[in-house]
Image (cartoon, rainbow, N blue to C red):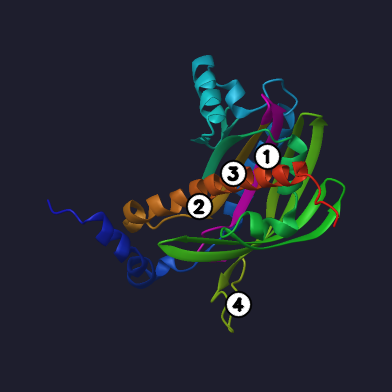
């Protein structure tokens, strides 16, 4: 049997996607797909709102003791814990037809940084394009009413193919105690950007594009303990399904983007939270 070298397969992927398989260019987000995703998201919202009241606050806290202890050792050593989750909520399996759902959770520990510093940075949406570049290319806070935010974010991903999507999101923040805070957000509207940065840049019709980001919900938990702050982010992303003939080639790339985006998100959060904490603790400049 003759095997294709990985490098050659990667180089051929754009041609296969955009040339040999025009059906991979554009696809429709079907109403029944979005409705099924919304049911799954609503169930996760309800579960999240209930679980944040528990003493076992973080995802690692509910793991079996040997694994939990190992996860904490990994986090305190400045590592990251990341796991792929399923589509089951309280024992009920949610199917989302004609699409893929990517469900991940990741955690980092930021020693020496207070929870307030981390949360202020995460909710500083006007500067997300600086904190989270290049994954976030543009960002703007549209409105804020106490803990309720309306936000615009332009996401950019390049993984063999390049994709840019304008999203509008709704986010809620809630303080549970002086050492615990939570947030969750929903994408309410998403449109892929065609010819980004060019004079003919346009937004494709919502739900009729290449389908790399149709919806994304995030769930954040922040807990200050052990001399720093633990940051947990869980993401649920809705993307297009893969044509069966190309599933073996395309699926690894499609499924890797949500994971890599979450890793980058938490690494950036840790980096800039440390910088913000250092700036807060720096002595004021001497008067001339």
Magenta region = 207-228
| 208 falls in the magenta region | yes
Label of residue 99 in the image? 2
Q: Label 4 vs label 1: CA separation?
A: 32 Å
Magenta includes 45? no
Label 4 close to label 1 by CB (< 8 Å): no
Q: Left or right of 162: which side holds 234?
A: right
User: Which residue is disc 3 drawn over?
Assistant: 266
Of 212 and 227, nearer the camera is 227
Q: Nearer the viewer, mark 3 or mark 1?
A: 3
In the rendered structure, which disc, 4 or 3, sits on the residue that comes first in sequence? 4
Question: Residue 85 or 241: which is nearer the viewer?
Answer: 85
**Residue corresponding to mark 1:** 220
Q: Residue at x 54, y 40 (%)?
A: 104
Q: Earlier in the sequence, mark 2 or mark 4?
A: 2
**Residue lying at the far bottom of the rendered structure:** 199
Residue 269 spot, x, y in % from top left: 63, 45
Residue 137 at x, y percent in the picture:
61, 64
Residue 202 numbered tag: 4
Does 89 sit above or below residue 2? Answer: above
Question: Can residue 262 be seen?
Answer: yes
Q: Is residue 94 visible?
A: no
For the residue labelled by badge 2, is the local secondary structure a helix, a strand or a loop? strand
């Amino acid at each position: 049997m003759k095997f294709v070298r990985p490098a050659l397969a990667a180089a051929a992927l754009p041609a296969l996607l955009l040339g040999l398989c025009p059906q991979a260019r554009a696809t429709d987000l079907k109403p029944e797909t979005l409705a099924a995703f919304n049911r799954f998201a609503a169930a996760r919202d309800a579960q999240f709102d209930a679980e944040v009241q528990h003493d076992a606050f973080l995802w690692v806290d509910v793991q079996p003791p040997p694994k939990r202890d190992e996860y904490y050792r990994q986090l305190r050593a400045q590592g990251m814990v990341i796991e792929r989750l399923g589509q089951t909520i309280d024992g009920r399996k949610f199917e989302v037809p004609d699409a893929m759902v990517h469900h991940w959770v990741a955690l980092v520990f930021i020693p020496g940084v207070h929870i307030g510093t981390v949360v202020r940075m995460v909710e500083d949406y006007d500067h997300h394009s600086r904190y989270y570049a290049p994954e976030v290319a543009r960002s703007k806070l549209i409105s804020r009413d106490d803990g309720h935010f309306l936000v615009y974010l332009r996401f950019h991903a390049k993984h063999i193919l390049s994709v840019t999507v304008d999203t509008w999101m709704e986010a809620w923040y809630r303080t549970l105690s002086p050492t615990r805070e939570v947030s969750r957000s929903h994408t309410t509207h998403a449109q892929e950007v065609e010819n980004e940065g060019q004079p003919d840049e346009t937004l494709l019709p919502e739900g009729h594009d290449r389908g790399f980001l149709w919806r994304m919900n995030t769930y954040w938990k922040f807990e200050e303990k052990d001399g720093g702050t633990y940051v947990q982010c869980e993401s649920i992303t809705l993307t297009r399904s893969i044509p069966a003939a190309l599933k073996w080639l395309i699926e690894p790339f499609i499924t890797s983007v949500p994971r890599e985006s979450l890793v980058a998100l938490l690494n950036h959060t840790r980096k800039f939270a440390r910088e913000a904490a250092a700036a807060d603790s720096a002595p004021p400049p001497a008067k001339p």
